[in-house]
Amino acid sequence: MATLTIRNVPDHVKQALRVKAAQSGNSLEEALRQLLSDEVEQHMPASRISADEILRRAAELEADEPTDSRYKFFSQKELSDAISGEFEGL
């Protein structure tokens, strides 16, 4: 994990964040981590496919024969190109 240092935070802002964190039963550090994570998640586009589906497709690429009949007669390159094309625009 990365470490961030934020300088020149006004004392009243730091104190207000510390009080808010304590009221939630968290340390200031934990409250700030959560605040940053929430901010990032609000602005990240949602994936159109699940992580399980991505892993299934990755395993399929490594297998000798794809389990999805649409790709049964594709070469590894064609299969990779077909699956990769589904991720354009993400």
Image: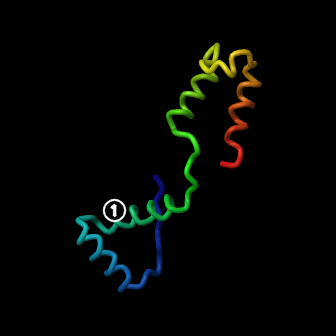
Q: Could you tell whether 89 is left or right of 12 in the image?
A: right
Residue visible at 41% across and 66% down?
35
Secondary structure at badge 1 equals helix
Q: How is the image coloured?
A: rainbow
Question: Does residue 14 appear left or right of residue 36 in this picture?
Answer: left
Residue at image x 23%, y 72%? 23
Q: Amino acid at mark 1?
A: Glu
Decide which of 13, 1 is in the foreground and name it.
Answer: 13
Residue 27: image quadrant is bottom left
Question: Which residue in the structure is indicated by mark 1?
Answer: 30
Q: Is residue 87 above or below residue 63?
A: below
Residue 17 horizontal/vertical position (percent): 34, 76
Foreground of the two, 16 or 50: 50
The 10 Å Cα crowd at callout 1, few under 14, some 14 to 19, many 20 or more, is few
Q: Nearer the viewer, residue 86 or 20?
A: 86
- 50 vs 79, left or right, is left
Q: Quadrant of residue 78?
A: top right
Residue 56, picture quadrant? top right
User: Horizontal and vertical percent for residue 3?
Assistant: 46, 60
As rendered, which of 50 and 77 lies closer to the eye? 50
Q: Position of residue 52 (x, y in %)?
A: 50, 33
What residue do we see at 27% from left, 77% from top?
19
- Residue 64 vertical position relative to residue 55 in the rendered view, above or below: above
Image coords of residue 32 (percent x, y):
39, 67
